[in-house]
């Protein structure tokens, strides 16, 4: 059953600006805000942890005044510690680091919280759920990657569903307030299965910003597929 709006546990949608028209980014962000998006997902890539390079803190700084929505910042970067302060200062609301990219994960999480931001941890498709166990009690969010990170528009990897269910179980056991998010290949076909498996926050890049009839229609289609 899909929880009803206003329920704490309600499904949230986080459009990823990776697929937006960056020549009019502020407008694109305001459009999804008006259409009911819950947060904006900012994909930061370093060309090392993933085979692509995208945005840095300066983009977050310019985006901050353009919307009231939280700016969720997904750090697909190796050894993220050196950049946490800069993203916090720029206006990120939450920072998500990768289990596979952080060297001292517990310290990194403590630093993010010390900056007053929400702390999230992401795991790649090849990483087992058990890698979250030691840090899960202190997390605000877990992000299960449903594609290999680096690019928008990839196909959902079905094998991640089993792990998603397992992460859901672990969260329910030790930290029920922790959000469970999925990222990669989320569209109106995959979203219902992902929610059924336990996801409560859905990142959506190409299904929103790549939608041929525009981001508002893309977002509405996605919400409709979930009965929202
Ligand atoms: C992929 C990024 C995603 C990306 C998702 O590495 O982390 O956030 O924008 O794009 P779609 O929704 O097109 O798969
Ligand atoms: Zn992402």
Image: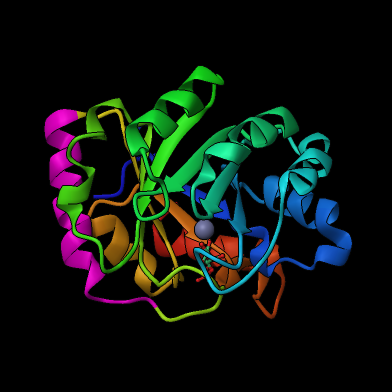
Residue at (36% x, 67% y) in the render: 146
Residue 143 at what x, y percent from top left? 37, 50
Membership of 44 in magenta stretch: no
Residue at (42% x, 81% y) in the render: 155
Residue at (11% x, 33% y) in the render: 173
Residue 3 at what x, y percent from top left? 31, 42
Quarter of the image holding residue 220?
bottom right
Is residue 157 placed above or below 180 in the rendered structure? below
Residue 57 relative to residue 182: left or right: right
Membership of 164 in magenta stretch: yes
Residue 94 at what x, y percent from top left? 54, 35
Label total for image: 0
Residue 206 at what x, y percent from top left? 59, 72
Region in magenta: 156-174
Is residue 68 placed above or below 53 in the rendered structure? above
Q: Main secondary structure of the magenta part?
A: helix
Residue 9 visible, this angle: no
* Colour approach in the figure: rainbow
Residue 74 visible, this angle: yes
Quarter of the image holding residue 202?
bottom left
Quarter of the image holding residue 225?
bottom left
Residue 40 relative to residue 62: left or right: left
Residue 44 relative to residue 147: left or right: right
Q: Nearer the viewer, residue 100 or 141?
A: 100
Residue at (68% x, 65% y) in the render: 215
């Amino acid at each position: 059953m899909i929880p009803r709006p206003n329920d704490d546990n309600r499904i949230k949608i986080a459009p990823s600006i990776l697929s937006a028209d960056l020549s009019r980014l502020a407008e694109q962000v305001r459009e999804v805000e008006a259409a009911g998006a819950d947060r904006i997902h900012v994909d930061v890539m370093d060309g090392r942890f993933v085979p692509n390079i995208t945005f840095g803190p300066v983009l977050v700084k310019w985006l901050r005044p353009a919307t009231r929505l939280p700016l969720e910042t997904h750090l697909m970067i190796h050894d993220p510690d050196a950049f946490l302060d800069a993203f916090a200062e720029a206006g990120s609301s939450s920072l998500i680091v990768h289990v596979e990219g952080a060297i001292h994960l517990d310290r990194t999480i403590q630093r993010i919280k010390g900056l007053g931001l929400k702390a999230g941890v992401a795991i790649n498709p090849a990483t087992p759920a058990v890698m979250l166990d030691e840090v899960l009690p202190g997390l605000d969010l877990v992000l299960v990657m449903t594609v290999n990170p680096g690019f928008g528009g990839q196909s959902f990897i079905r094998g991640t569903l089993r792990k998603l269910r397992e992460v859901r179980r672990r969260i329910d056991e030790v930290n029920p307030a922790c959000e469970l998010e999925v990222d990669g290949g989320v569209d109106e076909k995959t979203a219902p299965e992902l929610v059924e498996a336990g996801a409560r926050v859905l990142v959506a890049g190409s299904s929103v910003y790549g939608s041929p009839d525009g981001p508002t229609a893309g977002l509405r289609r996605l919400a409709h597929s979930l009965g929202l």
